[in-house]
Structure formats: C-alpha cells, structure tokens
Image (cartoon, rainbow, N blue to C red):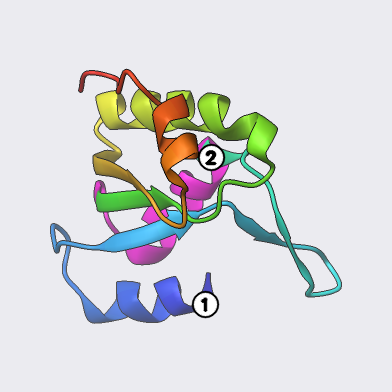
C-alpha cells in the first residue's frame, strides 16, 4: 500500500492506473495470499491512489486456488459498480483461466 500512496500523491484524479490484489500483510509484516477481501482491497487501493476508478485491477496470484471463482465474481461486481475499468489476472495458468470461463459480461 505504501507504493500506492506515493503514486496517489503524484498523479491527478482520472489518471490511468493499474494495481493488483490478493497479497495481504499480517501485523508482523509478513505477507500471505488471500482472495477473500477483494472489495476491501479495492477500496484501499482507490483511497491510496486517490482514484474513483482503477483502470486495470488484477488478481495477482491465484491463491488459494479454491477461491479463484469467488474472487473473479467480486472483481466483476466492482467493475459493474465502476470501481474497476478493466479486470485482469496475473500469474494464472491456462487451466486457471479456463475456470473463469465464460468470462462475465461487463
């Protein structure tokens, strides 16, 4: 989140920005993967980046694998709300991408 804060102070509202979700920090500073808090992560990114809409919002790692479909549904809902311009994924295998098919209509 600190990189998003720096970027947020450097850009104007309506700038094209891209960021990722799915990696969270524990209180002790160590990271872990979770796809259960997509809406909260997106809210935090929008606040730190000072943007109403994130141009490209990506699921960074498909972990845990059992949460991929639910996470994609959350991404679709946020896209429909206008919080996300274009949904995306990063580090997904072909099989994991196929699990997202058919792709939601935005």
Say which residue label 1 marks. Answer: 2
Q: Is residue 42 magenta?
A: yes
Left or right: where 62 falls relative to 64: left
Q: Does the magenta stretch include residue 28?
A: no
Residue 11 in the image, given as x and y percentages of width and height: 20, 75
Left or right: where 95 falls relative to 17: right
Say which residue label 2 marks. Answer: 38
Q: Is residue 2 visible?
A: yes
Quarter in which the C terminus is drawn: top left
The residues colored magenta run 39-54
Q: Count up the numbered dots.
A: 2
Give me the residue at 42% from left, 71% from top. Answer: 4
Q: Nearer the viewer, residue 42 or 19?
A: 19
Answer above or below: position of 15 versus 59: below
Give me the residue at 32% from left, 45% from top. Answer: 88
Give me the residue at 29% from left, 61% from top. Answer: 18
Q: Nearer the viewer, residue 19 or 62?
A: 62
Residue 64 in the image, given as x and y percentages of width and height: 69, 42
Instruction: Report which quarter residue 31 is drawn in.
Output: bottom right
Mark 1 Cα shell of 10 Å, populated few (<14), some (14-19), many (≥20): few
Instruction: Give me the disc on residue 34.
Output: none
Q: Is residue 36 visible?
A: no
């Amino acid at each position: 989140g600190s990189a998003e804060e720096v970027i947020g102070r450097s850009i104007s509202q309506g700038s094209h920005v891209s960021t990722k979700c799915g990696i969270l920090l524990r209180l002790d500073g160590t990271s872990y993967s979770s796809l259960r808090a997509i809406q909260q992560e997106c809210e935090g990114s929008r606040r730190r980046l000072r943007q109403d809409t994130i141009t490209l919002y990506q699921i960074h790692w498909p972990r845990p694998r059992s949460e991929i479909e639910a996470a994609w549904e959350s991404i679709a809902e946020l896209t429909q709300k206008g919080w996300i311009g274009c949904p995306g994924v990063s580090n997904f295998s072909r099989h994991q991408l196929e699990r997202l098919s058919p792709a939601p209509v935005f």
